[in-house]
Image (cartoon, rainbow, N blue to C red):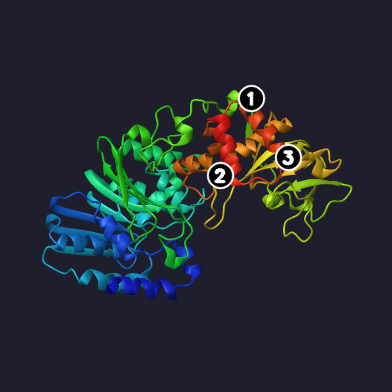
Amino acid sequence: MPSVIEQARLRISRNTEAKKKSQFGQFLTPEKTASFMAGLFPVADGCCRLLDAGAGIGSLSGAFLTRWRSGSFGFRRVELDAFEVDSYLHPHLNETLVRYSSSSFTPTIRGVDFIYAATDWLSGNLFAESLPQYTHAILNPPYKKINSNSAHRLALRRVGIETVNLYSAFVALAVALAAPGGQIVAIIPRSFCNGPYYRPFRDFIFERAAIRQMHLFTSRSKAFKDDNVLQENIIIRLERDGRQGSVTVSTSTDDSFVDLATHEYSFECIAPPGNPERFIHVPTSLEKNTIERSTGMNYSLDDLGINVSTGPVVDFRLKEHLRNMPDPCTVPLLYPAHFASPGTTWPIEGMKKPNAIRRNPDTEKWLYPNGFYCVVRRFSSKEERRRIVASVVDPGAFANAPVLGFENHLNLFHESGHGLPQELAHGLALFLNTTVVDESFRCFNGHTQVNATDLKRMKYPSRNTLTELGKWMMQQGTLTQTMIDDKFITLAL
């Protein structure tokens, strides 16, 4: 039977409107996940100064205190700072903490904004309420974007933190507030591992902490299934001022942890040297994947003379130039929906998005010459089997259109702003649609999206190999995944 805290979490989750969840960006931690996170802290004694920022109803603090009460920690006393800005949750949080009342436990519920409280103290504000150096922090921080000109963003900049989401801001502040050797355990989206927007956050963490452990939930929908959250989540343990060594990586499908698997990796496997973006790689097997083992997969896009770009047409910025269906003054505008089935389907009557864009001096710079291109959708949805979905743009689908528009939800491969040779476009699409590419991509990409930066980082077969794959693909009828994988392994590996 679920504990009293878990029953309260389920009840609150069911009765809280989605709008409010989105407003606060906070999703309460399931009991099994909270217990797993509390179990990641190494055994310690002395006095514990515990931080729970975004405490909710106290699920994480409760799990930590339950472990302490069981004797797994040797703390003489625990002093807790539980930050929770949603006053509606305070009675539930207090009810949780009261269960652990003792002379050696001092809880403080702080109903203030954690970002403002922490940045005021760290920046030396004379009127700031003092905060201790925390020996431990356990976090399920809110997930919500921070606008570049918002008060939160400006406050974070005062203490040298540049980031785009509340979750990474909370983790960075927890590290900044930690004592030397302080342990931070947080459950956060995996999106921080790669992409340019989180580069400053990764730099901040690497310079101030060592990564000790990471746990990956391989399902994108089950870690917070009661709240219908679609996000690839990771639990990370950091040590403030720690000397970086090997990293423990564990995986499970969901928060039942019944298929828990754990391996040890050198830090070079986690953050490969020579990686200017400092991406974090989360390996899930001790064996190298097929691409890593292959000697024929050593080519960058620069080596191949191929470029990849995000589709330049941002529809809401060019709204006055868009048309539902083509007319003599327009050219084709391509969205992911035009590649939902094999080949290119254009125009699509009744589609919610426009099929065409006017060609004029205001739009000309956003258009590409008609030709063969390889395109990859930027976003995957729900529990899609594949992260990378590639298609070929066939110029024959657009009659005599001289140029094409590519909407921002597509990435396109091209040669200096022009189309690719036909065989190369097909071969590139076949390669990107292989199972081994998808599996390799998932090891370093934690988004539900595929960015041009991610595609640039990948290694590819030679141009000749891609061309041969394309020639074979063009001679086939309907292709199955098995046919694609077998041909790729035969020719390229």
Considering only order in the chain, which callout, 2 or 3, is on the residue closer to the N terminus?
3
Tell me which amino acid carries mark 2: Val
What residue does disc 2 label? 450
Q: Residue at x 65, y 34 (%)?
A: 427
Lower sequence index among marks 1 and 3: 3
Q: Could you tell which of marks 1 and 2 lies nearer the N-terminus? A: 2
- Pick the quarter of the image with the N terminus: bottom left
Residue 87 appears in the figure:
yes
Look at discs 1 and 2 and give the one toward the viewer. Answer: 1
| Separation of marks 3 and 2 at Cα, in angstroms | 21 Å
Q: Residue furthest right?
A: 328
Q: Identify the residue position indicated by label 1 in the image.
A: 464
Q: Residue at label 3?
A: 366
Secondary element type, mark 1: helix
Give the vertical position of 35 relative to 365 (above or below): below
The percent coordinates of residue 141 (x first, y second) are 38, 56
Q: Nearer the viewer, residue 153 or 180?
A: 180
Which residue appears at 15% of the width and 63% of the height?
Answer: 69
Quick one: 447 or 239, which is closer to the camera? Answer: 447
- Camera-near label (3 vs 2) is 2
Left or right: where 411 falls relative to 443: right
